[in-house]
Amino acid sequence: MSAPGQSPENPFPVRGVAIRVAGWIDKLGPVWVEGQIAQLTLRPNSNTAFITLRDPAADMSLSLTCPRDLVTNAPVKMTDGTQVIVYGKPNFYTGRGTFSLRVSDIRAVGVGELLARIERLRRLLDAEGLFDPRLKRPIPFLPGTIGLITGRASAAEHDIMAVASGRWPAVRFEVRNTVVQGPNAVPQIVEALRALDANPEVDVIVLARGGGSVEDLLPFSDETLCREIVRCTTPVVSAIGHEPDNPLCDLVADLRAATPTDAAKRIVPDTAAEQALVNDLRRRSARALRNWVNREQHTLAQLRSRPVLARPLEAINARADEIHRARRAARRDITRLLTAETDRVGHLAARLTTLGPAATLARGYAVVQAVPANGAPHVLHAVADAPAGTRLRVRVSDGAITAVSEGGAGDEE
């Protein structure tokens, strides 16, 4: 036969399982646990207080029970959202089959400790580069639709919508009202942030809340919310609290506004200011254009007033007489040169004529050439060059005659 609880034929009764689970849990020792009070119930005729303790960084909670006096006599007021550290022993109630922690000590987390934890988280996120200015997305100049995450009917919502609509009446809003403090704030804000980021019509998201204590602003320094802001593709503007407040979401957001009103002024341009700027630019451009035209007209007038442009032929006329004088001087010099050269050529021609053979022939001289039968004629230089019978050619001033040599005079003697 199988052991109890190990087969359908020999099952455990409910009480058997409950008693065994209670025994196992009872062996666990007491522990210190930290979390946020999500719900606190004090029944009028009961000495037991019932508390739901929530983990702000995860969607998990734990049921606590404690003596009523432990809550009423606490050094700080225990309300929803209070960060506490409890000391208790795990307990399993067999009658209802529920698990809870029987608390014997409750301590509120002090402001100093909260600030120290925020500082540690700030250093962690900074080391991961989530505060890098290069990750900041630019805010559009004129957003068509603004996603707004804030408390219901809050002053922050009224201020942003009133100021933005006054500056640019055509602006539209996509509002998501959430809890802005307490244990349920982070899940609701993260859900609203994801919904607005997924909406293609939303151009910028504003996370807004009025001022408050360090404990009230704790959700806006939550690690889950900070990482969700970084993951958004839509620019996120943080407008939490007043000027001195500086939760961690201010550092990871794309733009940090000092107040909700400042956020509306920084993301929506002022219609009157932009119209005034346009008018001023138009006046300045028109004045600059007029000045440019006047300056160019003045330059053209100066150019036209110059003599070379006002009377362009005057310079030519002024040089005409000089050109005529130069031409006359050139002609005179050329004529004189030609006359001198003509005289020189005449003198040379006369000398050449005087020295030439024609002049000599004209004075009665003759040139005698021997004309051989088969050779070229040649001038006779001596009597021996023309023996008897040599054909001769005698050139005189007016022509040439032929003759036959009879030999030299000496030969006859």
Image (tube, rainbow, N blue to C red):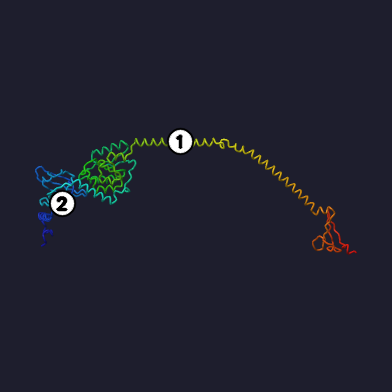
**Residue sitting at x 33%, y 38%:** 269
Mark carried by residue 291 = 1
Residue 183 horizontal side relative to residue 17, left or right: right
**Residue situated in front as seen by the camera: 297 or 155:** 297
Give how far across and how far down residue 306 sits, in percent: 55, 36
Measure how far apart labels 2 and 1 are at the Cα level. Answer: 81 Å
Q: Position of residue 247 (x, y in %)?
A: 25, 45
Task: Please tell me the numbered disc located at residue 92.
Answer: none
Can residue 163 be seen here? The reply is yes
Callout 2 environment at 10 Å: few (<14), some (14 to 19), or many (20+)?
few
- The extreme right residue here reads 413
Q: In screen coordinates, is 114 left or right of 132?
A: left
The residue indicated by pointer 2 is 32
Along the line of sight, the residue nearer the viewer: 307 or 395: 307
User: Label 1: how many residues lie within 10 Å, few (<14), some (14-19) or many (20+)?
Assistant: few
| Helix, strand or loop status at disc 1 | helix
In the image, residue 393 lies at what x, y percent? 83, 59
Work out which quarter of the rendered image holds the N terminus and state it.
bottom left
Image: 210 above or below 227: above
Report the residue at 66% width, 39% height from top: 325
In this rendering, position of residue 355 left or right of residue 34:
right
Could you tell me which secondary element the residue under label 2 belongs to? strand
Q: Nearer the viewer, residue 302 or 278?
A: 302
The reply to whether callout 2 and callout 1 are in contact (CB within 8 Å) is no
User: What amino acid type is highlighted by mark number 2?
Assistant: Trp
Question: Sequence-wise, which precedes: disc 2 or disc 1?
Answer: 2
Callout 1, which amino acid?
A: Asn
Residue 215, horizontal then vertical, whole percent: 20, 44
